[in-house]
Amino acid sequence: MASRRVETAIGPAVFDFGAQYFTVRDSAFAEQVHDWEALGLVKQWPIPRPDAYVGVPAMNTVLRHIASTKDVTFSALVKGLKRHGNRWQLMGEGLGDTWYDGVVLALPAEQTAPILTLHDFELAQAALFARSQPCWTGMFAFAERLNHASGVIRDSGLIAWATRNNAKPGRSGPESWVVQATPRWSLQHIEFTTDQVGPLLFNALAEEIGAQLPEPIGQSIHRWRYALSAGTGASCLWNPMLRVGACGDWLIGPRVECAWLSGRRLAERMVAAASIAAE
Ligand SMILES: Cc1cc2nc3c(=O)[nH]c(=O)nc-3n(C[C@H](O)[C@H](O)[C@H](O)COP(=O)(O)OP(=O)(O)OC[C@H]3O[C@@H](n4cnc5c(N)ncnc54)[C@H](O)[C@@H]3O)c2cc1C
């Protein structure tokens, strides 16, 4: 649910460059989304589908809200876990020397595997075998409106999805388009540089719009190496003896709702295990 701000000559353009919208199927998640909606954090965006929601004014609003109620350290890469007695320490720069009772890895499978495998190989196997697909994403801002009525392009050539980002609910700012390539094309071009991929995504958008596009007034290109997860059949992982576990969309499926459900299931398991231990 990532959003990126790009400065332009006519003001900032803010792009949702990861998840484009999310849908709601589970009743507990529906309740959660209802609460977010009441707080003004999300709105329905019926253009791609009737049950689609987006964060307002940007996709990351929900995460900012959750983070504001927790003690969060940003921009700190966890390189490993150290176990001493029955406590855990996070290894990496800027993480301090706090010892924790338990650890949850809420990372993509490919980043979970190397950390978990040193401590619980059995648990780590699910992550070791999970493979996600990449997604090259282009963000382009323009000084004028592009000639495309619906503002949504799907499954055409190398484009899996492209949209007029500033037309989503609660957005403002310059005309801005997000272009996401298909998993197949992204994989074929995975080791290209952003300078190489940018023009290819831009030209694909021009081809879809059917006209020569004006020069962008701002742009950014991002490679998501681990974008679309496959799901494992398990909803979460938890070792009650070591008090280490994992959650994330990759355990269920490649959707925001799946990530939320995985976290919720893990929390339920942790609470249940703690209650048994306390008896
Ligand atoms: C391009 C793209 C388009 C998508 N489109 C949609 C969509 O339209 N609808 C939908 O429902 N879903 C979509 N998804 C999927 C959705 O974004 C995911 O399902 C959801 O974000 C998964 O949440 P998560 O918390 O499991 O993992 P993530 O959102 O991947 O969060 C994991 C976090 O861990 C951090 N991290 C990783 N390694 C470390 C480390 N070693 N130390 C510290 N931090 C680390 C990462 O920086 C990241 O912030 C899309 C995803 C992508 C990438």
Image (cartoon, helix red, strand yellow):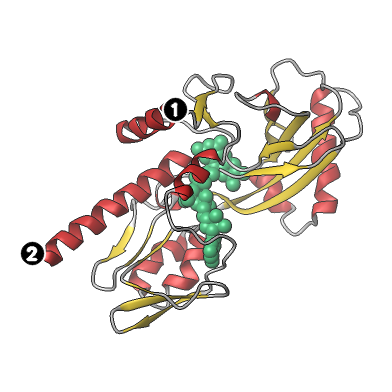
Is residue 164 in sight in this rendering?
no
Amino acid type, residue under disc 1 in the picture: Glu
Residue 86 % position (x, y): 28, 79
Up-down: is 221 above or below 80?
above
Taking the image as shown, residue 40 lies to the left or right of residue 205, namely left
Q: Give the x, y percent position of residue 165.
A: 68, 30
Element type where label 1 sits in the image: helix
Please tell me in which quadrant of the rendered image residue 178 appears: top right
Q: Residue furthest bottom?
A: 85
User: Where in the figure is residue 58, as x and y percent of width and height?
Assistant: 60, 35
Examine the rendering and report whether any part of residue 81 can be seen. Answer: yes
Q: Which residue is mark 2?
A: 279
**Quadrant of the image for the C terminus?**
bottom left
- Calculate the distance from the C-alpha at mark 1 to the C-alpha at mark 2: 39 Å
The secondary structure type at the circle numbered 2 is: loop
Q: Pointer 1 and pointer 2: residues touching (CB < 8 Å)?
A: no
- Residue at 12% in and 62% down: 276
Q: Quadrant of the N terminus?
A: top right
The correct choice, above or below, for 174 with respect to 221 in the image is above
- Give the vertical position of 146 relative to 179 (above or below): above
Q: Nearer the viewer, residue 76 or 214?
A: 76
Within 10 angstroms of label 1, few (less than 14), some, or many (20 or more) residues? Answer: some
* Residue projecting furthest to the top: 149
Q: Amino acid at mark 2?
A: Glu
Q: Is mark 2 within 8 Å of ligand 1?
A: no
Dot 2 alpha-carbon crowd within 10 angstroms: few under 14, some 14 to 19, many 20 or more: few
Splitting the image into 4 quarters, where does residue 98 fall? bottom left
User: What numbered label is drawn on residue 53?
Assistant: none
Q: Is residue 28 left or right of residue 275?
A: right
- What residue would you read off at disc 1? 37
Task: Determine the residue positioned at 54% across, 30% down.
Answer: 54
* Sequence-first tag of 1 and 2: 1
